[in-house]
Image (cartoon, helix red, strand yellow):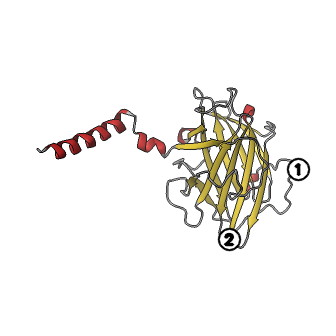
């Protein structure tokens, strides 16, 4: 074997070993949702072209609960953070909206998931992954937040829990896209101080349209319920 060929083989083997030794880093990257630090907190605009959003790469939610592609609903979700808040922005194509006929934006809407919503489930307890928080925003700016404890008997979905999170939404009917933005106080999802390198557990979802409804997730849950914390990916705060 000549020197050049031998070097190529060794380089390839080294790359394979790095991937194996790193626990499958290439596969793991697909399960990491990077949140980029913002210089300061900012007003909610529900606009991916806003200066604080336009250079932030999204994760893509485009599969159903069983991991099959959902045509026409390729959802982009972006994230930023500051020491005080976590921001999420959804860009949500739709075919037909299914909206609550009497929207209320000054109080949370119980069972908002019966209508069109974008959702985030976030947990910071790595020893009991069945405890996490749920946040939802609708195309009309409705919202709901819940504290979840699936390890309780019976499982607890506490609608009285209040994070104080804020939302903004808008619909572009010409493009058939709606945008939903969340600002979630960090102290309500993690007792640890927010800093670069901090990790939490997350999955993001949409429920969309009239029956038969579309169920879209970033990390497929492989079950009927989105409430499958075993499927969560990793939210990583980065500079």
What residue is disc 1 on? 106
The residue at 77%/46% (across/down) is 42
Taking depth in this image into account, of 60 and 66 the one nearest to the observer is 60
Q: Image quadrant for the C terminus?
A: top right
Give percent across and percent down for residue 184: 74, 41
Q: Which callout, 1 or 2, points to the residue nearer the camera?
A: 2
Of 220 and 49, nearer the camera is 49
The picture places residue 228, in percent across and down from the top left corner, at 58, 42
Q: Quick check: 204 left or right of 157?
A: left
- How far apart in space, not on screen, are marks 1 and 2 (Cα)? 28 Å
- Which one is earlier in the sequence, the residue at label 1 or at label 2? 1
Q: Secondary structure under badge 1?
A: loop
Q: Dividing the image into 4 quarters, which one contains the N terminus?
A: top left
Under circle 2, the secondary element is loop
Q: Residue at point 81% right, 37% down?
A: 160
Coordinates of residue 76 in the picture (x, y in percent): 61, 56
């Amino acid at each position: 074997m000549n020197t050049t060929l031998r070097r190529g083989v060794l380089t390839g083997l080294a790359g394979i070993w790095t991937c194996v030794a790193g626990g499958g880093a290439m596969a793991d990257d697909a399960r990491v949702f990077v949140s980029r630090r913002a210089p300061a907190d900012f007003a909610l605009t529900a606009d991916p072209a806003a200066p604080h959003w336009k250079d932030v790469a999204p994760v893509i939610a485009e599969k159903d609960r069983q991991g099959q592609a959902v045509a026409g609903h390729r959802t982009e979700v972006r994230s930023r953070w500051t020491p005080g808040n976590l921001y999420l922005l959804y860009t949500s194509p739709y075919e037909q909206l299914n909206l609550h006929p009497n929207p209320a934006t000054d109080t949370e809407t119980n069972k908002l998931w019966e209508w069109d919503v974008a959702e985030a489930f976030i947990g910071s307890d790595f020893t009991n992954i069945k405890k996490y928080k749920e946040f939802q925003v609708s195309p009309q700016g409705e919202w709901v937040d819940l504290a979840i404890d699936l390890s309780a008997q019976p499982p607890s979905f506490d609608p009285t829990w209040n994070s104080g999170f804020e939302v903004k939404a808008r619909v572009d009917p010409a493009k058939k896209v709606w945008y939903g933005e969340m600002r979630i106080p960090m102290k309500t999802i993690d007792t640890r101080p927010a800093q670069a390198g901090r990790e939490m557990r997350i999955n993001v979802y949409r429920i969309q349209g009239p029956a038969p409804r579309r169920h879209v997730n970033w990390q497929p849950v492989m079950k009927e319920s989105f409430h499958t914390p075993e499927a969560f990916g990793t939210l990583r705060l980065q500079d």
